[in-house]
Image (cartoon, rainbow, N blue to C red):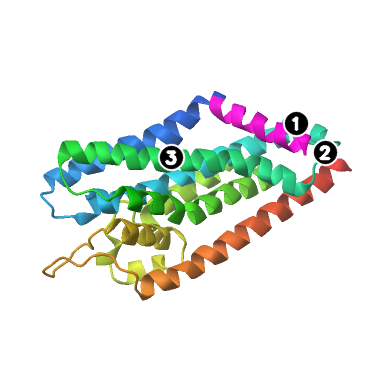
Amino acid sequence: MRTARAFIKRNILEILRDPLQYIFCLGFPVVMIVLFSVIGKYADGMDDVFNAKALIPGMIMFSFTFVMLSVALLTSKDRTSAFLIRLYTSPMRTVDFVLGYTVPCLVVGVGQEIICIAFGWIVSLIVGGAYFSFGAALLLIVGMLPMLLICIFLGVLFGSVLNDKAAPGITSVIISAAGILGGAWMPLDAMGGFETFCRVLPFYPSVYIGRIITGAVHTPTGAEPPAVYAFDSVAALGFIPIAVVLVASVVLAVVAFRHNMKSDKK
């Protein structure tokens, strides 16, 4: 247990020492919040996806994918540097190693949520527009956690099966796909069949549920008063891909790490 705690502490320090964490995990989402908020202001309300209530859940989901990149790089580098091989002689189990990567990244992800919500509130005061309540913010943090866990365990999986050269390339594909297929800055609810396809992946349902929490408005509305995101069949069915991908990512991450652990011990 003491070794596992030391491993978690070590990974926290590794993350804090890496300047890329501050650029991609924190800086990039903040820049995008400013950019799309400004676009939304000068779009004169034509695209509600840039409204703070709709934008923040999308940016939170998108920022989680950079946590996936971080944990994939950390895991793959530890493997290629033989750091993990030395730790295999300790009493730590596979679950201890996986948690050792998961816990620090979970802290980073929650920090991303808080920063995105707080910075979004500041930007909304500057550019104008309604914002969601403190209670909704707390619920949003909790409601987005399954997506965060998916990204973390996918990162452990990619870091376990890929080296530190290949991991960034594969995760970059997922990052791009999450932004587009999750509707982080695109009005998927106006795209018909494409939105239907996006419902079977965890990105869009996660954002959809987040927008229900914040009380965002659909794009385009076409109705008076504007149609607000509500807990409907899309949200209810959205829990299925989120749960399936979460369970699959956890199982695959543990199995892949255990396989490498057994192989490296030989």
- Kind of residue sitting beneath label 3: Gln
Q: Is residue 48 above or below residue 68?
A: below
Q: Is residue 51 toward the left or the right of residue 60 in the image?
A: left
Image x and y of residue 159, in percent: 64, 43
- Verify CB contact (< 8 Å) between mark 2 and mark 1: no
- Residue 120, image quadrant: top left
Mark 2 vs mark 1, CA separation in Å: 9 Å
Taking the spot 60% from the left edge, 27% from the top edge, the residue there is: 13
Q: Name the residue under label 1.
A: 83
- Kind of residue sitting beneath label 2: Tyr
Question: Furthest residue to the right?
Answer: 266
**Majority SS type along the magenta span:** helix
Taking the spot 19% from the left edge, 43% from the top edge, the residue there is: 39
- Kind of residue sitting beneath label 1: Phe
Mark 3 vs mark 1, CA separation in Å: 28 Å
Residue 117 visible, this angle: yes
Q: Residues within 10 Å of mark 3 (few under 14, many from 20)?
A: many
SS at badge 2: loop
Q: What stretch is highlighted in magenta?
A: 1-16
Q: Is residue 191 toward the left or the right of residue 67 in the image?
A: left
Image x and y of residue 137, in percent: 35, 49
Q: Mark 2 points at which residue?
A: 88
Q: In which quarter of the image is the C terminus?
A: top right
Mark 2 vs mark 3, CA separation in Å: 32 Å
Q: Is residue 21 magenta?
A: no
SS at badge 3: helix
Of the numbered discs 3 and 1, the one sitting upstream in the chain is 1
Q: Name the residue under label 3.
A: 112
Question: Furthest residue to the front?
Answer: 135
Determine which of the numbered discs, if any, sits on residue 252 in the image: none
Residue nearer the viewer, 135 or 180: 135
Of the numbered discs 2 and 1, the one sitting upstream in the chain is 1
